[in-house]
Amino acid sequence: MANFYASAGDHLRRIYGRRIDTPAVLDIAEYFPRAKMFAAEWRSLRDEAITVAATLDRVPRLHEIMREQSDISAHDGRDWRMFVVKEYGATVRRNLSRCPKLANLLDKCPEALSACFSYLAPGKHIPVHRGPFRGVLRFHLALSMPRDAEGHPGATLWVDGVPHRLDDGDTLLWDDTFPHEVLNATDMPRVALLLDVWRPGMPADLAALSCFIVGIVGMFAYIRQDAFTG
């Protein structure tokens, strides 16, 4: 299955790469203007994420949701836990009911296809990897960023080789089909909100293909809802 996932990702990246040549990091105002709604409520979203973290041992690790991702999630024995409330259009109602502020924002933002709180354990390294699908973009909102010994944000996200250190409330929009990597070089967890949002302005045929892919993945996510609730 892992080989199939990798092969399908390579094929999809080639199809989209021939027609879409935007950079790794994109302008939020142009590509996801509703991001400002989430950024304005980052403190409320942080409160919800911290409340969820009170039972973090019941939140699944990424490789428990997707076994194909074991090489980036389970390789170092440190946790990367994902509290998924929406996955490619399929709502995880049990999880979403615990996050009323996030639920309200998602109701106003139909282009947000997936949403989760991401919990990166102290010392966790996510090695270089690439997403398979350029029809969506990844939005990152830092909610609780631990500090290094000098008091600077202590977790680094590299996108296409460029480091980004997001402080609490900071945002970034990027194309996750570019190589990216994360290291939490602190002794505290890093908490973030991650959204996958619809890429605007695609050619009609790629938009149709994207709708098909989103529909298929969303159908499987709906069937597998128990995997997201731990």
Image (cartoon, rainbow, N blue to C red):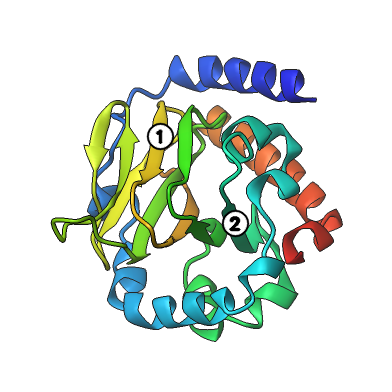
- Would residue 115 be found to the left or right of residue 145 on screen? right
Q: From the viewer's perspective, is residue 82 above or below residue 134? A: below
Asked where in the image residue 85 lies, by quadrant, the reply is bottom right
Query: Residue furthest toward the right?
Result: 223
The percent coordinates of residue 14 (x first, y second) are 52, 14
Amino acid tagged 1: Glu
* Element under disc 2: strand
The percent coordinates of residue 37 (x first, y second) are 34, 72
Query: Residue furthest toward the left?
Result: 150
Quadrant occupied by the C terminus? bottom right
Amino acid tagged 2: Arg
The residue at the point 79 percent across, 50 percent down is: 219
* Element under disc 1: strand
The percent coordinates of residue 48 (x first, y second) are 49, 81
The percent coordinates of residue 10 (x first, y second) are 59, 16
What residue sits right under mark 1 in the picture? 181
- Would residue 16 be found to the left or right of residue 169 on screen? right
Of residues 129 and 222, the one nearer the viewer is: 129
Is the residue under label 2 in contact with that under label 1 (CB below 8 Å)?
no
The residue at the point 28 percent across, 76 percent down is: 40
- Viewer can see residue 111: no
Q: Which of marks 1 and 2 is nearer the N terminus?
A: 2
What residue sits right under mark 2 in the picture? 81
The residue at the point 40 percent across, 32 percent down is: 180
Q: How crowded is mark 1: few (under 14 residues within 10 Å), some or many (20 or more)?
A: some
For the residues labelled 1 and 2, the Cα–Cα distance comes to 16 Å
The disc at residue 133 is none
Q: From the viewer's perspective, is residue 54 above or below residue 110? A: below
